[in-house]
């Protein structure tokens, strides 16, 4: 597994150096093959790096018009977050339950939205999750 991790790291390092969309896509293909069966955290990290590389060279793929990933109803705290790192996509990728989803939502956004208040909200949901799981 370490060899796979080293290969992923080398490909990411190489992809960061190229400035041509076709070269980025060359590395994207190789990275997707290597990460097909990887841990979800590794896949999310790699997808974030791919997004950054595509954005840098101006080759972000067009998403379906009207995709919820392209719209934020209020505020700007998700404005610069790549779609694969948006909270609801993380919840789906990790199959999180309601309380886990609420906890991670507040922890992921606290710096850009409501500060310490969001951390208190996360702790409130964590306390309820602990209470709920303790009663089983």
Image: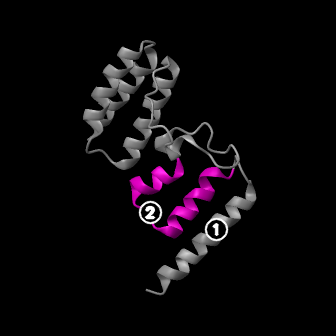
Task: Identify the residue at horizontal 37%, vertical 48% (top origin).
Answer: 40
Q: Give whichever of 130, 21 is nearer the camera.
A: 21
**Magenta run includes residue 7:** no
Q: Give whichever of 110, 83 is nearer the camera.
A: 83
Q: Give whichever of 79, 7 is nearer the camera.
A: 79
Instruction: Pinpoint residue 14: horizontal percent, then vertical percent.
Output: 39, 19
Q: Which residues are magenta?
A: 86-110
Task: Identify the residue under disc 1.
Answer: 123
| Left or right: where 32 falls relative to 127 | left
When asked about the image quadrant of residue 128, the answer is bottom right
Instruction: Pinpoint residue 64: horizontal percent, then vertical percent.
Output: 44, 37
- Image quarter in which the N terminus is found: top left
Q: Residues within 10 Å of mark 1 (few under 14, many from 20)?
A: some
Instruction: Pinpoint residue 89: horizontal percent, then vertical percent.
Output: 46, 50
Q: Which mark is on residue 75?
A: none
Task: Identify the residue under disc 2.
Answer: 96
95 to 65, vertically: above or below:
below
Instruction: Pinpoint residue 114: horizontal percent, then vertical percent.
Output: 74, 54
Q: Give whichever of 35, 55 is nearer the camera.
A: 55
- Image quarter in which the C terminus is found: bottom left
133 to 60, vertically: above or below:
below
81 to 6, vertically: above or below:
below
| Left or right: where 99 falls relative to 3 | right
Q: Tag 2 or tag 1, which sits nearer the N-term?
A: 2
């Amino acid at each position: 597994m370490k060899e796979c991790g080293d290969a992923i790291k080398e490909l990411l390092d190489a992809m960061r150096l190229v400035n041509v969309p076709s070269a980025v896509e060359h590395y994207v293909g190789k990275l997707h093959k290597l990460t097909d069966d990887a841990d979800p955290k590794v896949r999310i990290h790699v997808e974030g790096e791919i997004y950054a590389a595509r954005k840098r060279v101006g080759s972000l793929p067009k998403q379906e018009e009207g995709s919820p990933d392209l719209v934020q109803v209020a505020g700007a705290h998700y404005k610069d977050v790549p779609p694969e790192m948006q909270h609801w996509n993380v919840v789906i990728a990790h199959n999180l339950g309601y309380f886990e989803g609420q906890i991670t939502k507040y922890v992921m956004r606290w710096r850009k939205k409501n500060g310490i208040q969001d951390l208190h909200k996360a702790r409130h949901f964590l306390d309820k999750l602990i209470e709920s799981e303790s009663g089983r």
